[in-house]
Image (cartoon, rainbow, N blue to C red):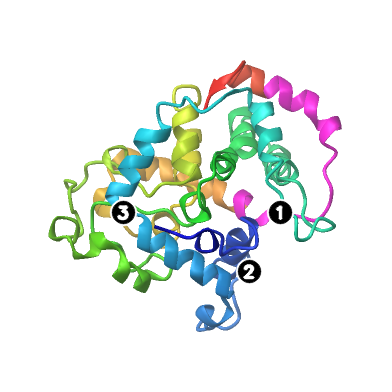
Amino acid sequence: MISPSESTPLADLDEWEDDLLLRYPEEKPKDEFRDYDAETRPGVREFYRLNHRYQTLDFVRKKRAEYLPLTKRRMTVWEALEYLNTLVDDSDPDIELPQIEHLLQTAEAIRADGHPRWFILTGLIHDLGKILCLFDEPQWAVVGDTFPVGCQFSDKIVFHEFFADNPDSGTAAYSTPGGIYEEGCGLDHVIMSWGHDEYLYHVVKDKLPDPALYMIRYHSFYPAHKEGAYDHLMNDHDREMFDWVRKFNPYDLYTKSTERVDVEALRPFYDELINEFLPGKLSW
């Protein structure tokens, strides 16, 4: 069992995303051999210790069985945005922007670059699965770099050494590169670690084009789209779609700003966009 203190090592969920900027800075670091580990906050290290210890195949299967019937709530996209907006960092209310503003910043950057309407909508909703925190899920089961379970954990995963405490690391069937999967089986046949990406994918999977679904489902799969791991599990369609994931990644990482967004002024445009692709109440 995990104590309440163990379940919340991060000050807030944005601390994980801030750490991503240390690992993947927008500009190439001057020192190619800088010590990333030395720059990592203790809370982030503890977060990954818990994530890598408890994200087992059995755990993921249990969470899929619990959540993927999608019976927790019925909400429109905008209601989900407002619900997520209650997830704020109470420790620093003068600086931390509401979650909805971060998502609008991403969507507006995509819109400014002239991308298709479905791409803009993807920017708006891509983190809505973080409402898992509001269903009392621990942080390590909501955010963090994602990875396949049921096969060998790649050494390209951040803080790979923490997998030594994961029970699956000592299970022979899960300890080869392929594990329970056939080579080239395609990611749709691979069980990913549990979190906001996989959850939201299942909420919208029948409603958006394939590139959008890959962006949603795999935008935290940094071992693959940034580090080149797990190619042996992919098929040609995965590789084609990952071009879209990589196109989305800069908007996810580099659009966060302290500059406020006028939510009410933007809402008519986004109401129309939501109604075009995801009208009415969705099952969560």
Above or below, comparing residue 33 to residue 81 in the picture? below
Which marked residue is nearer to the observer: mark 2 or mark 3?
3
What residue appears at the point 59 percent right and 76 percent down from the top-left corner? Answer: 29
Give the residue number, with chain letter if any, for mark 3: 56
Left or right for 246, reference 102: left
**Residue 15 at x, y = what percent?**
63, 62
| Residue type (three-letter) at the residue carrying disc 2 | Glu
- Where residue 111 sits: x, y (%)? 70, 37
Circle 1: element type: loop
Q: Main secondary structure of the magenta part?
A: helix
The structure residue drawn at horizontal position 71% and vertical position 34%, both measured from the top left corner, is 82
The residue identified by callout 2 is: 27
Q: Earlier in the sequence, mark 1 or mark 3?
A: 3
Crowding at label 3, few (<14), some or many (≥20) Cα neighbours within 10 Å?
many
- Magenta residues, as a range? 251-273
Between disc 1 and disc 2, whose residue precedes? Answer: 2
Instruction: Please give left or right for residue 210 compared with residue 119 in the image.
Output: left
Between 16 and 217, the one lying in front of the other is 16
Tag 1 residue = 256
